[in-house]
Image (cartoon, rainbow, N blue to C red):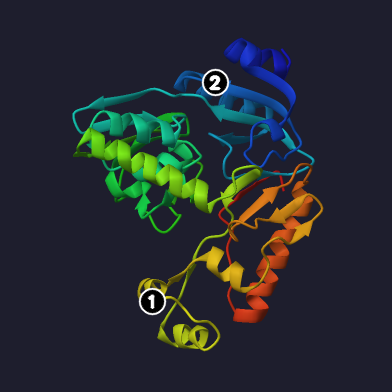
Amino acid sequence: MSITEQLKLIVGSRLSENEPMSKHTNFRIGGPAKWFVEVRTIEEIVHVLKIAKDEGLKTFVFGGGSNLLVNDDGFDGIVIKMAMRAYSIDGNRVRAEAGVLSAALARATANSGRKGLVWAISLPGTVGGGVRGNAGCFGGEMRDHLVMVEVLREGKIVELSKEELKFGYRESVIKHTDDIVLAATFELEDGDVDELKMELADKLMKRKESQPQDAGSAGCLFKNYNVTDDTELQRLSEKLDIPAEMNASRRLSAGWLIDHLDLKGMKIGGAQISNVHGNFLVNTGAATADEVVQLIAVVKTKARDQYGILLMEEVQYVGF
């Protein structure tokens, strides 16, 4: 049987060939995936991965497509979308499959009076991607209330504790392995439903006020910059008027740095640094991945030349 026929036996109509990845990323950018499948069970993803291995094909697994930049030439292999979207709330113990939208889980837990994930209402991606990169905003991170994660490793389900995941700022051990997140379990706290609903509304309002809403974007493009030591902090303080909060945390906001580089509004083709938030690079309508990469290079070069800072991307490159 052909590869297409084998995949169709597993996922049926949830298979597409030469599927434009621009339809599946928040950036609205990306060439075609040779094969695109949506998996809804562990058995399906295991079978799809076996076909890929047997046929010598590359694979790429993703959830919501919120933090991806896909090459204009697409992906010459199988792209697998995690569509496992079940979750359960048992007291304060919450288990969510990888494809559950982080914002949906935030709302569901708040509505049930469980406190700890309200911050995630403004997170655009899925639980799986959020755990992999220890996503965070509004002072919260995925690791805060996480207990354990189930991953797929060489066809077997493996449970990893919070300690084993070695979380850091936008970092986990999963980013450096072939493990695929299947589900995550959180231990939340009791909360007041009305108060939690007010927090949800407040965070959504803050997001609308501070982030661009009308263009394709991968969210914050660069990681905030961690100052290494006192010597570097002193050097940067001579060039920048660093706010007290950043001074104390030894972490400089990438958006704040880009503001000081005077790059807001800069465009290359259809890619533009947002006028609303310096750390958002937006697709104004017809941007290409190549134009985004060029603009990223401009920002990184200017940050290095002006402040001696190496900014690191949060966005994940696919097919480059």
Q: Is residue 102 left or right of residue 73?
A: left
Q: What separation in Å lies between label 1 and label 2 (alpha carbons)?
A: 53 Å
Task: Determine the residue positioned at 54% across, 21% down.
Answer: 47
Per the image, the residue denoted by label 2 is 47
Residue 123 percent across, percent down from the top left? 46, 43
Residue 254's quadrant in the figure? bottom right
Disc 1 secondary structure class = helix
- Residue 243 placement, left or right of 55: left
The crowding category of the residue bearing disc 2, from other C-alpha atoms within 10 Å (few below 14, some 14 to 19, many at least 20), is some
What residue do we see at 66% from left, 18% from top?
15
Residue 120, position as x, y percentages in the image: 40, 42
What residue type is disc 2 on?
His
Residue 305, above or below 126: below
Residue ID at (73%, 16%): 2
User: What is the number of the mark on residue 244?
Assistant: 1
Image-based side of 74 in relation to 49, left or right: right
